[in-house]
Image (tube, rainbow, N blue to C red):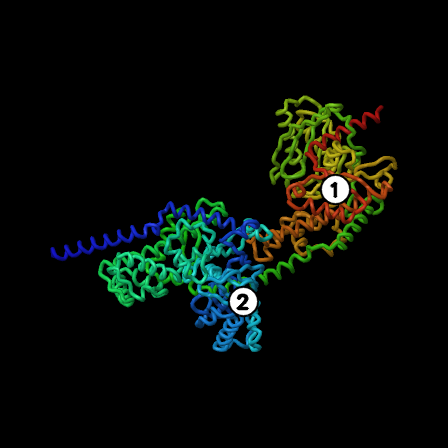
Amino acid sequence: MFAVHLLAFHFTKLKEDQIKKVDRYLYHMRLSDDVLLGMMARFHAEMVKGLGRDTNPTATVKMLPTFVRSLPDGSEKGEFLAVDLGGSQFCAHRVKVFDDGKQSSQLESKFYPTPKEVIQGNGAELFDYVADCLLDFMETNNLKHKKLPLGFTFSFPCKQTKLEEGVLLAWTKYFKVRGVQDTDVVSSLCKALQKHKDIDVDVLALVNDTVGTMMTCGYDDQRCEVGLIIGSGTNACYMEEMRHIDLLEGDEGRMCINTEWGAFGDDGALDDLRTEFDRELDLGSLNPGKQLFEKMISSLYLGELVRLILLKMTKEGLLFNGKVSTALLTKGKIEMKHVSAMEKYKEGLGNTKEILTELNLFPSEEDCIAVQHVCTIVSFRSANLCAATLAAILTRLRENKKLLRMRTTVGIDGGLYKTHPQYAKRLHKVVRRLVPNCDVRFLLSPSGSGKGAAMVTAVAYRLAAQRKQIDATLTPFLLSLETLREVKSKMRTEMEYGLKRETQGSATVKMLPTYVCGTPDGTEKGKFLALDLGGTNFRVLLVKIRSGRRRSVQMYNKIFAIPLEIMQGTGEELFDHIVQCIADFLEYMGIKGARLPLGFTFSFPCRQASIDKGTLVGWTKGFKATDCEGEDVVDMLREAIRRRNEFDLDIVAVVNDTVGTMMTCGYEDPNCEIGLIAGTGSNVCYMEDMKNIEIVEGNEGRMCINTEWGGFGDNGCIDSIRTKYDQEVDESSLNPGKQSDRLALLQVRRILQQLGLDSTCEDSIIVKEVCGVVSKRAAQLCGAGLAAIVEKKRENRGVEHLQITVGVDGTLYKLHPHFSRVLHETVKELAPQCDVTFMLSEDGSGKGAALITAVAKRLHNVGQK
């Protein structure tokens, strides 16, 4: 027993001594966490450089866009072919994807050798060989009679401008085919396939093997957004935000980026980490100075790296008693399969002795321990380097999503990862240590890049079908210039109907007189109250107007909510609530005893008999209070004040919000004679010559007309441009058949539902397009109506060219990124003889109501004098 313990102690001591000896010798290959964190930062900087339009040309990490915009969502179906070129074997695949709710698929594959004369010959021979292999595969599987889509996995760096096109930037690994670099490899494959008249395939997608791996794993796990290859070469891809890809136009959605990280360090960025052995290996490779990172990681080079280390250690007398064999001097004699065998847990030392003996070396036990540890250090460094760059990608993904902690999946393929006994375990451990705030699942690709190419093709098929449906859905929203001119003409016709006594009753554009007969001239002054009712909130304002050299407007306001049960209750409840709010405000401001003139902004269609009398035509915007339509809203307000019996007010004017907007801007710009609202509702008013207003007595002067153009089309005159979505939104609204050109948000939601999406869909590209088309149409229709009004103003004045200002308010106009631009362009296109300035209103419904009251008071005083 004592002898056994002594022997075990001796072996342990021997092993420790040999490990320490190798550790000292290969000190620079043992990377600390600090070094790896620094490497993460370096790689992230290279990623940013590769994504930048100006910095990409000098970047070594090329960050190539793949034009893969979407991961599998489980709805893919069909039969697809795939060919896979880039590894030690060429593969042809047939993939059947079933839409059975189980995300199931069926794969059939055949492997072909890649002879040296083919992969180091000329381009025509290479692609002819690929086409011949595909023909054999289709004959074997009885597929020659079918027309099938094909995905082409090509595991070399390509610059893509679309999914089915890619120009080879450089060969890597052991490929060196003449006449292919800087050409489109898809075009070359298609030419080779065309020589075989008896097969018919469509090459729909060019895919890097990393992308194929990500897509294959993404079919099984939709959290998978990184693809990683660690085999004869190494590379990674991931889903990047479009807003960060300066190389391409557009900023919505995501796209898969092929990092081509094998070239990391080609500019010297890793020189401090590269050893003399790395440099010697590089000099003896097919592509010196290129793919330096890959040469420190991939299985194609690790065996040779071990050989170079053993050779030097032997020459220095540290191994094999200093005796070098011819085999040890021969390049390529140690391969990755030998390194993996030597690192096996139990039989590793036995394997080491056997392999070294085959190299005509005569290893001692100490030599075997040392050689095994050399292999461990080389493969461990590979895993560490790979972990650091992968950690940089995971960190970028997390930061892009603005998450403190992220769950994600990395799809992995490659012989080194799959066959090395310790590699995967080491990689996982280091990644989790470097990015503790990422919960990472590593998913082994079940069938590699071949199925992945088919999945990319399947996704492309799904997206093409979706594109067709989107185009069919959105085409009715696209308005031609001729259509807009027709809308403008019909608006003008409806306006004339609204102004004439005999046709006004049936007109959809009601052209309601407001009895506002002047705009501010700068002499207005005094204190005024203003009420603003038109949405879910109600405002009470105190407005102080000063005239003269120190002309100014000061406002104090308070906002009150209007509960839904009040909005849709009785009229008496609504106006009692309004008076309660007024009382609270007067108490708050300490002016309850003052009888101030008041302007009432009432943003609903009213037929006015005078400036202080307005009969509600009909509710809009969600209001449905009973016993109000057909009643004078000013009388209802006065009655509510009398019921409360706490204060009295001089109600001078009932005002529409568009009129308030016009008056507010008119206070700053005397040329403003039009008011426009584009928000939760849409309306316009303008100053019309009295001689054109048949529905009001008198021919002198002008009066502001509230068009109430939201009802335009209620008689069917624009049914030709209304879509089924307009119809659905109209039917589900509170006032079907009326005010139909509104509720753009509901239209968007209906369209998304039709496309199989919901309002929380992550497919931001489609959502943006739908929103863009709907809002553009809204701006164009608004512009066509406004063009009709400015043209009428020009004709009223009898001038060839008109300069006029439009006061504008409303959240759609103010907040939408493109609405105002499209509106301006449409007006300019449809009314070229009108120079229209758009002026943003400052609180039209509040300040405007006070200004109308002030103007009315001024004109009343003038009339009395």
Q: Nearer the viewer, residue 381 or 22?
A: 22
Residue 480 visible here: yes
Describe residue 777's horizontal placement relative to residue 755 as left or right.
right
Residue 716 visible here: no
The location of residue 834, given as percent across then percent down, is 80, 44
Q: Residue at x 67, y 58 (%)?
A: 475
SS class of the residue under badge 1?
strand
Describe residue 665's horizontal placement relative to residue 438 as left or right.
right
Q: Nearer the viewer, residue 450 or 736?
A: 450
Q: Quadrant of residue 412?
A: bottom left
Residue 179: image tag: 2
Query: Could you tell me how far apart the alpha carbons at marks 1 and 2 are, in whole angstroms?
Result: 67 Å
The location of residue 193, given as percent across then percent down, is 55, 73
The location of residue 479, given as percent across then percent down, is 72, 54
Query: Is there a contact, CB below 8 Å, between mark 1 and mark 2?
Result: no
Describe residue 620's horizontal placement relative to residue 451 as left or right.
right
